[in-house]
Image (cartoon, rainbow, N blue to C red):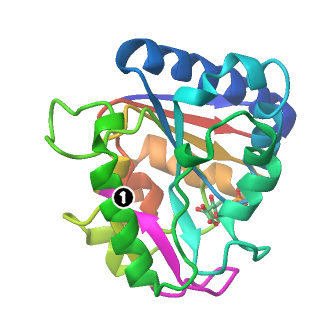
């Protein structure tokens, strides 16, 4: 794993650098294996980035026809609900870009229990394996070209919360979670560590002064951090980058 940290003065600056980086990874992935697979994060921090990606130059420089969009996690609410991560990304990005809609793979919350939604999403990942880069280390696991993640004030990432039984999941790729102690108080569906850690690149987008100490602990004292913060368990085979403001 190669790990890098970059600090920014503003969310706009962080978002522009993220957009540039995503564009570069997308073009490289398409040149190497014909597709670009990205898992998107929820929360507030990436919204500005998503809005930027829907504008010039990215609307024309990202190879949207070869891009396949997934979600790292979702709240168990219907897709039109204000707390839906899919709705947020749809409004900020998807409805403005020339991506074929069959390349957008939402976590199917409506009409399913969180367990059913997780099982459907895992089956979908199995079906979509041909679009993923292949792992030299763990045959058969989906290797995302890029996974975007956020960091919560309690050290959670995706929907992997402190003390959750899902933190120990080693075989399932997608799991339902209990209701976390953070807002909104609804169950979630999340990618698990085996998938996060198989990615080529994981990019954390972190905003908020109160999270800086958590990031410092994860970077400077990784062993101690692993017992405190789920995000410290993200150690991808490829590159781990932290963009912080
Ligand atoms: C979610 C997430 C979650 C989020 C962090 C950070 O669905 O809530 O995907 O892991 O990324 O809570 O959120 P903020 O960017 O809003 O601080």
Query: Up-down: is 238 above or below 20?
Result: below
Q: Which residues are magenta?
A: 178-193
> Is 183 in the magenta?
yes
Q: Is residue 61 left or right of residue 149?
A: right
Would you say residue 42 is visible in this rendering? yes
Looking at the image, which residue is at 36% across and 35% down?
131
Looking at the image, which residue is at 15% across and 41% down?
138
Q: Is residue 95 left or right of residue 43?
A: right
Looking at the image, which residue is at 66% across and 49% down?
212
Residue 114 appears at what percent x and percent y? 46, 82
Looking at the image, which residue is at 58% across and 16% down?
24
Asked where in the image residue 54 lies, by quadrant, the reply is top right
Query: Up-down: is 82 above or below 22?
Result: below
Would you say residue 192 is visible in this rendering? no
> Is 116 in the magenta?
no
Looking at the rendering, the quadrant in which ligand 1 lies is bottom right
Few, some or many residues within 10 Å of mark 1 (<14, 14–19, 20+): few
| Quadrant (top left/top right/bottom left/bottom right) for the C terminus | top right
Asked where in the image residue 184 lies, by quadrant, the reply is bottom right
Q: Which residue is tagged 1?
A: 124
| Secondary element type, mark 1 | helix
Q: How many marks?
A: 1
Query: Up-down: is 48 above or below 2?
Result: below
| Quadrant (top left/top right/bottom left/bottom right) for the N terminus | top left
Q: Nearer the viewer, residue 36 or 156?
A: 36
């Amino acid at each position: 794993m190669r790990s890098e940290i970059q600090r920014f003065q503003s969310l706009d600056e962080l978002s522009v650098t993220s957009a540039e980086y995503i564009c570069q990874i997308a073009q490289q992935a398409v040149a190497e294996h014909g597709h670009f697979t990205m898992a998107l994060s929820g929360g507030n921090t990436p919204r500005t980035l998503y809005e930027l990606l829907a504008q010039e130059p990215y609307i024309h420089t990202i190879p949207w026809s070869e891009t396949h969009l997934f979600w790292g996690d979702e709240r168990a609410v219907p897709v039109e609900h204000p707390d839906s991560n899919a709705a947020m990304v749809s409004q900020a990005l998807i409805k403005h870009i020339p991506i074929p809609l069959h390349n957008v793979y939402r976590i199917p919350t409506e009409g399913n229990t969180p367990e059913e939604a997780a099982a459907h999403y895992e089956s979908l990942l199995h079906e979509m394996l041909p679009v993923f880069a292949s792992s030299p280390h763990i045959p058969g696991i989906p290797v995302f070209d890029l996974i975007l993640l956020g960091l919560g004030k309690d050290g959670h990432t995706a929907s992997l919360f402190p003390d959750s039984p899902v933190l120990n999941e080693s075989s399932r790729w997608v799991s339902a979670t209990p209701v976390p102690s953070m807002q909104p108080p609804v169950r979630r569906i999340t990618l698990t560590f085996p998938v996060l850690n198989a990615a080529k690149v994981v990019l954390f987008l972190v905003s908020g002064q109160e999270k800086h100490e958590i990031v410092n602990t994860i970077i400077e004292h990784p062993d101690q951090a692993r017992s405190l913060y789920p995000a410290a368990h993200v150690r991808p085979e490829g590159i781990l980058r932290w963009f912080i403001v």
